[in-house]
Image (spheres, helix red, strand yellow):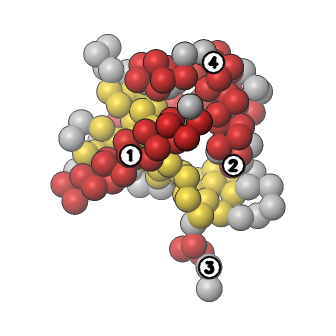
Amino acid sequence: MAHMWKKWLACTVLAALAWTAHAAPVPKDVERRVQAIVQAQLDAFARDDAPLAFSYASPDIRKVFGTPERFMAMVRMGYPVVHRPSSVTFLKPDLVKGQVIQPVQMTDESGQTWLATYVMKRQKDNSWRIGGCSVEEDDRLST
Protein backbone atom coordinates (compact mmCIF):
# COMPACT_ATOMS: atom_id res chain seq x y z
CA MET A 1 0.00 0.00 0.00
CA ALA A 2 2.81 2.45 0.90
CA HIS A 3 4.47 2.08 -2.48
CA MET A 4 1.14 2.48 -4.27
CA TRP A 5 0.19 5.78 -2.55
CA LYS A 6 3.64 7.27 -3.06
CA LYS A 7 3.52 6.40 -6.77
CA TRP A 8 -0.01 7.84 -7.07
CA LEU A 9 0.96 11.09 -5.32
CA ALA A 10 4.11 11.44 -7.42
CA CYS A 11 2.10 10.96 -10.63
CA THR A 12 -0.44 13.57 -9.52
CA VAL A 13 2.26 16.13 -8.80
CA LEU A 14 4.27 15.33 -11.94
CA ALA A 15 1.18 15.74 -14.10
CA ALA A 16 0.48 19.10 -12.50
CA LEU A 17 4.07 20.21 -12.99
CA ALA A 18 3.92 19.20 -16.66
CA TRP A 19 1.06 21.66 -17.07
CA THR A 20 3.10 24.57 -15.70
CA ALA A 21 4.03 25.55 -19.25
CA HIS A 22 0.45 26.83 -19.38
CA ALA A 23 0.53 28.44 -15.95
CA ALA A 24 -1.25 31.67 -15.09
CA PRO A 25 -0.71 34.04 -12.19
CA VAL A 26 -2.58 33.21 -9.00
CA PRO A 27 -4.86 35.97 -7.69
CA LYS A 28 -3.61 37.29 -4.33
CA ASP A 29 -6.75 36.25 -2.44
CA VAL A 30 -6.42 32.68 -3.76
CA GLU A 31 -2.71 32.66 -2.96
CA ARG A 32 -3.46 33.67 0.65
CA ARG A 33 -6.17 31.02 1.03
CA VAL A 34 -4.01 28.25 -0.45
CA GLN A 35 -1.03 29.14 1.70
CA ALA A 36 -3.26 29.31 4.79
CA ILE A 37 -4.46 25.74 4.11
CA VAL A 38 -0.92 24.41 3.71
CA GLN A 39 0.23 26.25 6.85
CA ALA A 40 -2.80 25.01 8.80
CA GLN A 41 -1.95 21.43 7.84
CA LEU A 42 1.69 21.95 8.85
CA ASP A 43 0.49 23.34 12.18
CA ALA A 44 -1.75 20.29 12.66
CA PHE A 45 1.22 18.00 11.92
CA ALA A 46 3.27 19.88 14.52
CA ARG A 47 0.56 19.15 17.12
CA ASP A 48 0.15 15.54 15.90
CA ASP A 49 -3.51 16.35 15.25
CA ALA A 50 -4.20 13.68 12.64
CA PRO A 51 -7.93 14.42 12.18
CA LEU A 52 -7.30 18.12 11.57
CA ALA A 53 -4.34 17.48 9.23
CA PHE A 54 -6.45 14.93 7.33
CA SER A 55 -9.27 17.47 6.95
CA TYR A 56 -7.07 19.65 4.71
CA ALA A 57 -6.53 16.80 2.24
CA SER A 58 -8.71 16.53 -0.86
CA PRO A 59 -11.43 13.88 -1.00
CA ASP A 60 -9.21 11.82 -3.33
CA ILE A 61 -6.41 11.75 -0.76
CA ARG A 62 -8.82 10.96 2.07
CA LYS A 63 -10.24 8.08 0.02
CA VAL A 64 -6.75 6.63 -0.61
CA PHE A 65 -5.79 6.65 3.08
CA GLY A 66 -9.17 6.06 4.65
CA THR A 67 -8.32 7.21 8.16
CA PRO A 68 -6.49 10.17 9.69
CA GLU A 69 -4.16 7.76 11.49
CA ARG A 70 -3.02 6.06 8.28
CA PHE A 71 -2.56 9.44 6.65
CA MET A 72 -0.45 10.71 9.58
CA ALA A 73 1.65 7.53 9.58
CA MET A 74 2.37 8.01 5.87
CA VAL A 75 3.46 11.61 6.42
CA ARG A 76 5.70 10.69 9.37
CA MET A 77 7.40 7.89 7.44
CA GLY A 78 7.46 9.25 3.91
CA TYR A 79 7.69 13.01 4.42
CA PRO A 80 9.56 13.72 7.67
CA VAL A 81 10.42 17.29 6.63
CA VAL A 82 6.72 18.01 6.02
CA HIS A 83 5.84 16.44 9.36
CA ARG A 84 8.38 18.55 11.28
CA PRO A 85 9.97 21.34 9.21
CA SER A 86 12.44 23.63 10.97
CA SER A 87 11.54 26.44 8.59
CA VAL A 88 8.96 27.06 5.87
CA THR A 89 9.05 29.60 3.03
CA PHE A 90 6.21 29.87 0.54
CA LEU A 91 7.37 30.49 -3.03
CA LYS A 92 5.37 31.93 -5.94
CA PRO A 93 2.44 29.67 -6.85
CA ASP A 94 1.04 29.07 -10.35
CA LEU A 95 -2.52 28.45 -11.51
CA VAL A 96 -2.68 25.49 -13.89
CA LYS A 97 -5.96 24.10 -15.26
CA GLY A 98 -7.88 25.21 -12.19
CA GLN A 99 -5.35 23.88 -9.70
CA VAL A 100 -2.79 25.88 -7.77
CA ILE A 101 0.75 24.55 -7.77
CA GLN A 102 2.28 25.85 -4.53
CA PRO A 103 6.01 25.32 -4.03
CA VAL A 104 7.21 25.52 -0.44
CA GLN A 105 10.84 25.55 0.60
CA MET A 106 11.38 23.65 3.85
CA THR A 107 14.40 22.99 6.00
CA ASP A 108 14.69 19.87 8.13
CA GLU A 109 16.25 19.63 11.58
CA SER A 110 19.69 18.82 10.11
CA GLY A 111 19.66 21.98 7.95
CA GLN A 112 18.95 20.23 4.64
CA THR A 113 16.74 22.28 2.32
CA TRP A 114 13.81 20.62 0.54
CA LEU A 115 11.25 21.73 -2.03
CA ALA A 116 7.72 20.53 -1.31
CA THR A 117 5.39 21.03 -4.26
CA TYR A 118 1.70 21.03 -3.32
CA VAL A 119 -1.12 20.50 -5.79
CA MET A 120 -4.12 22.41 -4.48
CA LYS A 121 -7.57 21.47 -5.75
CA ARG A 122 -10.59 23.75 -5.68
CA GLN A 123 -13.64 22.06 -4.19
CA LYS A 124 -17.29 22.47 -5.18
CA ASP A 125 -17.82 24.82 -2.22
CA ASN A 126 -14.97 27.00 -3.59
CA SER A 127 -12.58 25.99 -0.79
CA TRP A 128 -9.12 24.61 -1.49
CA ARG A 129 -7.75 21.25 -0.38
CA ILE A 130 -4.37 19.57 -0.77
CA GLY A 131 -4.50 17.10 -3.64
CA GLY A 132 -0.90 15.94 -3.48
CA CYS A 133 2.58 16.82 -2.33
CA SER A 134 5.94 15.88 -3.76
CA VAL A 135 9.18 16.50 -1.87
CA GLU A 136 12.68 16.61 -3.30
CA GLU A 137 16.03 17.93 -2.17
CA ASP A 138 16.36 21.59 -3.03
CA ASP A 139 19.80 22.07 -4.52
CA ARG A 140 19.17 25.63 -5.72
CA LEU A 141 21.03 26.97 -2.68
CA SER A 142 24.03 24.64 -3.14
CA THR A 143 27.29 26.04 -4.40
Q: Looking at the image, is mark 3 or mark 4 nearer the viewer?
A: 4
Q: Nearer the viewer, residue 31 or 20?
A: 20
The tag earlier along the polypeptide, 3 or 4, is 4
Secondary structure type for disc 2: helix
Residue pictured at 37% horizontal, 42% vertical: 12
Reading the image, the residue beneath label 1 is 11
Residue at mark 3 to residue at mark 2: CA–CA distance = 18 Å
Locate residue 6, reporting x and y percent: 52, 41
Q: N-terminal of the two: label 3 or label 2?
A: 2
The kind of residue on which mark 4 rests is Pro
- Mark 1, other Cα within 10 Å: few <14 / some 14–19 / many ≥20: some
Nearer the N terminus, badge 2 or badge 4?
4
Which element carries disc 1, helix, strand or loop?
A: helix
Image point (22%, 59%), residue name: 21
Location of mark 2 (residue): 81
* Amino acid beneath label 3: Ser
Q: CA distance from mark 4 to mark 1?
A: 22 Å
* Mark 1 vs mark 3: in front: 1
Numbered mark located on residue 142 in the image:
3
| Mark-to-mark CA distance, 1 and 3 | 27 Å
In 3D space, how far apart are the residues under numbered discs 2 and 4 (Cα atoms)? 19 Å
**Callout 3 secondary element:** loop
The residue pinned by badge 4 equals 68
Looking at the rendered structure, the kind of residue marked 1 is Cys
Along the viewing direction, whichever of 118 and 11 lies nearer the viewer:
11
Q: Are marks 3 and 2 in contact (CB under 8 Å)?
A: no
Q: Residues within 10 Å of mark 4 (few under 14, many from 20)?
A: some
